[in-house]
Image (spheres, grey):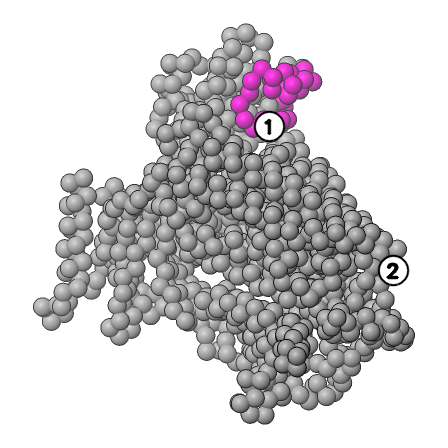
Amino acid sequence: MRRLALALLLGAALGARAAEPAAAPSPAAPPMAQPLHADVAIEARLTALSRELRCVVCQNEALSDSPAELAEAMRREIRDLMKAGKSDQEVIDFLVARYGDFVLFRPPLKPLTYLLWAGPFLFLALGGLAWTLALRARRGARPAPVNPAQLAAAARLLDDKP
Amino acid sequence: MKRWLPLGVFLVLIGFFAKGLFLNPREVPSPLIGRPAPVISLPVVGDAQRAFTTADMKGQVWLLNVWAPWCVSCREEHKFLMALAQSRTGPPVVGLNWKDRNREAARLLAFTGNPYVAVPDDPSGRAGIDWGVTGTPETFLIDRDGIVRFKHVGPIDPVVWQNKFVPRLKELGA
Amino acid sequence: MIPEIGTFALIVALLLALIQGVLPLAGAQRGRVAWMAVARPAAWGQFSFTLIAYGCLVQAFLSNDFTVINVASNSYSELPAFYRVTATWGSHEGSLLFWSLILAGWTVAVAAFSRALPLEMVSRVLGVLGLISVGFLSLLLLTSSPFLRQFPGPAEGSDLNPLLQDWGMIIHPPMLYMGYVGFAVAFAFAVAALLSGRLDAAWARWSRPWTTVAWAFLTFGIALGSWWAYRELGWGGWWFWDPVENASFMPWLAGTALMHSLAVAEKRGAFKAWTVLLALLTFSLSLLGTFLVRSGVLSSVHAFAVDPERGAYILGFMVVVVGGSLALFAWRAPRMIAGGSFTWFSRESLLLANNVVLMASVAAVLLGTLYPLFIDALGLGKLSVGPPYFNAVFVPLITPALFLMGVGALARWKGDSLPDMAVRLRWALGVAVATGLLLPLTLDGYEPWAVLGLGAATWIALTVLIAFRERVKSLRQLASLPRAFWGMHLAHLGMAVGVAGITLVVNYEKELDVRMNVGDQVQMAGYTLTFMGVEQYQGPNFSGTRGSVVVKEDGDQQFVLRPEKRIYDASGSVMTEAAVRPSAFSDLYVSLGEPLNNELTTWAVRLYHKPFINWLWLGALLMVAGGLLAAFDRRYRLATRERAAAAATAAQGA
């Protein structure tokens, strides 16, 4: 508890110093925060890749977002692999060999997933076809002959006249 | 006839949902099944001089039990494993000590007894990642040629042993 | 005592719902006025008793009655009273009771505002709503009662999930449910029309305002959920294509298609069969959402505790409601008379194209969400389908709809000319394309997707402007434009604003992960941030560590951000509360990671700069406003006003 108070006091003193107008002609530059992990390029790759990967112990979360311990371990593992020069694909293969396709949020394109990847565009194409057929059917259609009794009934319903 | 299409599609979906009620979406099968066991080469708990490697078990049918001193369900499973070891009817069991940061395994095993033929130490969890471990306890069955044949997630009790392990062990001639 | 009153009230509500469901429908079938007249009173009765039951649950929570299992699992004596009330919908059982209450509420709204409708139609609509209530109330009583008790009660509860202890999270479920349940009204109107065999433009006109209001609520609910996730989860995300999120998005997409289709059905009497089917499908998707959240069939961060038994019950309920309605549709479809004809290029054809794109999107999202289940059920393994898939597939799919939005709103009914339209729109198209191509040049990096998104947003905005220009010659005429006109264009404009926001934030956001000692500084997007350390404090039901980050903009503007980490007393869960500085053009977002030393003076800090992210939610609010405006267009109340005018004239003459 005392250590914490001391630390806070130290922090306040440092903060106060940073806010003070400098007395000397050339003030010391404020300390710049360092990136959390040294290699910024690898971190960027890690973040991008771990967004595509699933945290296998979570209820549907990305590896990049999960605070779970195993997720931390997997991110560390990926960082080590990248530092050792492995490409993104090699990292993916490494994880799939151990956890299966389940770990990928972007399903790999294989016969099992052809329907998944083609589906949306098939749906759009089918929809377009249905649209074309529906319109073609209508071009020849003439409106149905109107029954005067139905017309009067419709007027009644719409205007609510007794 | 296409007016029956929406109903038809719906009924097919219902069939899948009904099946889905019996499945567990979180249960992930191991991609290691049918493949050579990943190599473990680690010092054993309590004796940093001695090491365990998976090659040591070649020629035998054996179990890899992934456990941890902080894992509560492992304690229950431990009792069963002790009984199994004492009965001398089961295959050798290697206990991978997973993510034991506080170094409690040696003390715990001294207290409860040690059912394992070897206890490789994996404090970082690195070996666990190689085996696709997601939690404890998990148990793998490996055959004489070093091929992984089966993975069980969760503690082993007499029922699980009888239904899942015994038939497979018999098949492998253990 | 109170919880037992709650159970009793639910039983009475169920019986009244049964009466409300069976008698009026039978009465409409047989022409028995006495039976049909039961509908309104039964609906009011069901609502009253459901409200009593809900009141009992609220009382149990407010009085910390831990002998009620639901209260013990979801509350804590130190939980602020406000959250104790909202905890009533924080669990599976409580939220089902809340669903039932909202359903009863919409039912009485229909009962109250349907004076102009013929009794036969009203009794059918209320009857169908009654049967749906029967389903939910029996699900509640038989499998998911919130009033189960345990004796002796524990001394303390396990606390409400800390994620739910946020006011954004509080309004989100009620708004969502207002939307989901609101679509039941359109569903009930559709079934009533199928049962009566009379599917005319009048049906479409009555359904429209109800559908539009439900859609507005759902839009608001989804936007709130997204906004909450952004602020609360600490990693700056706002949409994850999680199965439960998709379960709310699909009814929204289908509801959008339904709103547009109803316009055609009302004005031209065309697409009647398709519109009816859409009404059935939209509510079916709502029910599907209910199933997915509560059955455990899919893995989701949002899921309530999993129980296959409840899942089976909901599945059975779906078979009856959805299967029954689709069977009814198949049976009665041939009876529907085709409506007016129109040409290849007309507002009808463009609205139909809108429907095609939207429903293809629904099918795509459904496919992606359910694919892991399909593969698993067929024994073919385990797959994950996540954001990379949905983003890759959804964006190209929805883009045609964005383009069509501009053209469709301006096209004439029955038949328009493409060359004419091209002349009207060529300037807008040119400016939109130019903006798309050139604007990213002024931004931090040239992103191809930004070209598409900004071009689409500009296109929509310009066509809205053109619509107003063509319609009014002077500003004074603006006031005389019908609300429906304002509503439509406001909603479309909201879409443009939302698309612009999404495009900019997704392509230009910045993230920094730094280690900060006390006194360290970091620069980001023109801001200088200085970490001042943390302090510990005690909240009502948690202990918090609050950081201080002093932020200086260019110039002397200065403010302090206070990201927090909280440990909740009852559950021990750790929550990250990000500190967000919102502005019209960007958000600065700071969140505390882990402490890097024991003295708590060095921390991992995550910083985000999110340009234009608030346009996302502003766009959603514009859509909600547009929807509500359109729904309250005066012509929907024309009949009432004419009657009032006629009565006044009669009174004068007498």
Give the residues in magenta: B143-171
Residue picked out by circle 2: C334
Name above or below for residue C362 compared with residue C377.
Answer: below
Q: Quadrant of residue C378?
A: top right
Which residue is found at the position 45% from the left and 67% from the top?
A: C614
Residue picked out by circle 1: B151
Evaluate whether residue C483 shows in this view. Answer: yes
Residue B169 lies within the magenta run: yes
Q: Chain of mark 2?
A: C
Which residue is found at the position 48% from the left and 41% from the top?
A: C56
Q: Between B109 and C74, which is closer to the camera in this rendering?
A: C74
Q: Residue furthest left?
A: A23
* Co-location on one chain, circles 2 and 1: no
Crowding at mark 1 (Cα within 10 Å: few <14, some 14-19, many 20+)? many
- Considering the numbered disc 1 on the image, is that residue within a helix, a strand or a loop? strand
Q: Is residue C127 left or right of residue C160?
A: right
- Residue C645 pos. (x, y %): 64, 78
- Considering the numbered disc 2 on the image, is that residue within a helix, a strand or a loop? helix
Evaluate whether residue B96 shows in this view. Answer: no
Q: Is residue C429 left or right of residue C508?
A: right
- Residue C612 pos. (x, y %): 45, 69
Which residue is found at the position 36% from the left and 23% from the top?
A: B104
